[in-house]
Amino acid sequence: MKQGTPSTLTDIAAAGRRAEHHAPFIRAAVPTDSWNLAVEHLAEGRLTLLDLWGEAGAVHIALLDEEAGEAAVASLECPDGRYPSVGRRHPPAIRLERAAADLFGLVPQDTPDPRAWLDHGQWGFVHPLGTRMPAAASPYHFLPAEGGSLHQIAVGPVHAGIIEPGHFRFTASGETIVRLEERLGYTHKGIEGLMAGAGIDRAAGLAGRTSGDSTVAYAFAFARAAEAALGIAVPPRAAWLRALMAELERLANHLGDIGAVCNDAAFPLMLAHCGVLRERVLRASDAAFGHRLMRDRIVPGGTAADLAEDGAAAIRALLANIRARFPALVRLYDNTASLQDRTVGTGRLSTALARQYGAGGYVGRASGRRFDARRAFACPPYDELAFDVPVLAEGDVNARVWIRIREVEQSLSLIEQILRGLPAGPVRADVTASDGPREGAATREGVATREGMAIVEGFRGDVLVWLRIAATGLVERCRLRDPSWFQWPLLEAAIEGNIVADFPLCNKSFNCSYSGCDL
Amino acid sequence: MRRLLFKSLIHSPLTEPRPPASSLAVGELVHALDGAARRRLGRSLAIRAVDAGSCNGCELEMNALGNAFYDLERFGIRFVASPRHADVLLVTGPMSRNMREAVRRTYDATPDPKWVVALGDCARDGGCFAGSYAVMDGVSAVLPVDLHIPGCPPPPVEILKGLLALLEGVNSKAATP
């Protein structure tokens, strides 16, 4: 933030009552006019929406001031369960509001879309995390698309491949898609409900199972939120090992997906070769950390275990292998006209929409949005490492593939730097909060609850975790926000005007998480 | 591309030898299978993957089975696009309530004889999601499960062992009517 110029965020927060302990960002309970001012800033593009979530009697929005590199949370108390809709002025909030309405019964006033989202009428009651009431069956109405010679294609929730369940409703004119509407929520497991009242360790395990391909990113974000809340300093070696895991996860996912995008363009040779490279990353991760996906390896306080004895050697061999093979695959991608014919110009996402929705990861960066949490909210060791954040403006499938290719190269370099600079020492600090009420400073100051928030760059984009720990040391409320919340609606926009046969290609180039949003 | 293809011709394949069938999995299987159905299956296994609310970790490892190291199809095992082509439903996840009807319909669309394999720890009893208002605590709450492959997620080699056990159980029983 520039000296002397108070940012919009500071103004909004200053008008409210600051939460006693909320680290490292500010949270303030704001009056309705400040809430509306924040919504105005969102609608006019001065702020970016990071998240919107509810709890009994209150609704929260996490806001980002991209230029100032600041984030803050504004909370609005709504004892009657009603609040002025954010989605009415700022569409990226709509699905978040629908989810909060399903879980807590919070009603966004004047919302453009009052339909249920996570609630499919299968739980036997409504508002599972608020005041539970008997459910009344109501059919789900898809948005209409009207005109001559339009037809609908309904796909899912069970798909033809090995992928997660979701329903896609295409309205097409001949082969051209005029509207796609997604209906998700099929994998809703009630994670936020299970977290309430859980100990820190159990909650960390649940966080790591929010989206399996981002298990490191979620465990990382949860651990950092918990550490921020409890004021725990992580040993330097653990911080570096976490970054090592995060980059290995990014590498594995990008390699797998580059191949899979090409496969959806009927080019399986790339899938075969990229699949081999992905498998080698998983095997090196297994050798280094004892699990192919590195699940449960990042824990509050540090890491569950140190790098295995021959782990560094396995990862170095991996780097050499990928460096020897990947450039030929990049040339193959670049030089195959039949492949480029499918990816160039397909599924174009405008820079304006990417910005409005605060699209993270390769989706945002292929459409000109530079945000990367490793830069904007750099935690050690990223503040000491050299890396580029590749950005393109084309916004098509090809651009998303290229961002992935460039990020593979950056991750290779980061992993090498981490192995070279890895400090010695312990890998876990003591976390006693999960054992019961905390003795010491916090209690003496009379702080009943402690809150923390963390933003971590997963392979898809920024994963946000917000956490409140009660005086008992148990989790009172935890919110996990996947980057896909803002990417799924953009897929609906990007697919418009493309042919039905290009949907798999567009979809895979976004590769949004179902489980991460359904929770 | 030509150079890559040529290289593939002269290098030995990456594919690794088949693992021994898991004896534990065989044990579960013996109880589960019906002799008459086994005779009709033949020497191949067509699998329909169904995600019933998983975190997508199991799907990643299922997908890995297709890579050059495991090369699933050499065992006569393949993933198919429709339940109507399937012998086996490979079901993952703690069985979310929102997926219950779709899973049931997928099962009904699968022709007999058919088997249900529950994949992963949460498919057995809900795993860490057990007790949630939104899940049924395991696949067996909706479908008759014939075999369970544990793990979070099970690595590809464990999935392979479980599937081989299913196949070997099917074939050995088929040979002795």
Image (cartoon, coloured by chain):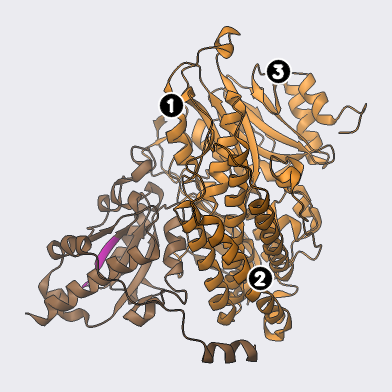
Chain colours: A orange, B brown
Q: Amino acid at mark 2?
A: Arg
**Above or below, comparing residue B23 to residue A500 in the picture:** above
Q: Is residue B116 magenta?
A: yes
Residue labelled with disc 2: A323
**Viewed as shown, does residue B177 lie left or right of A167?**
left
Decide if residue A114 is in sight here: no
CA separation in Å, label 3 and label 1? 24 Å
Mark earlier in primary sequence (1, 2):
1
Judging from the image, mark 1 belongs to the subunit labelled A
Q: Report crowding for label 3: few under 14, some 14 to 19, many 20 or more residues within 10 A (C-alpha).
A: some
Residue ID at (63%, 44%): A240
Q: Residue A137's spot in the image, x, y percent?
A: 41, 43
Q: Quadrant of residue A82?
A: top right
Front tag of 1 and 2: 2
Mark earlier in primary sequence (3, 1):
3
Mark earlier in primary sequence (2, 3):
3
Residue ID at (31%, 55%): B150
From the viewer's side, name the closer residue of A162 and A231. A231
Judging from the image, mark 2 belongs to the subunit labelled A
Decide if residue A408 is in sight here: yes
Asked if labels 3 and 2 touch by Cβ distance under 8 angstroms, the answer is: no
Tell me the tag on residue A197: 1
Q: Amino acid at mark 1?
A: Gly
Q: Which residues are magenta?
A: B112-117
Judging from the image, mark 3 belongs to the subunit labelled A
Residue labelled with disc 3: A18
Q: Residue A264's spot in the image, x, y percent?
A: 58, 75
Q: Quadrant of residue B126?
A: top left
Q: Residue A286's spot in the image, x, y percent?
A: 47, 57
Q: Amino acid at mark 3?
A: Arg
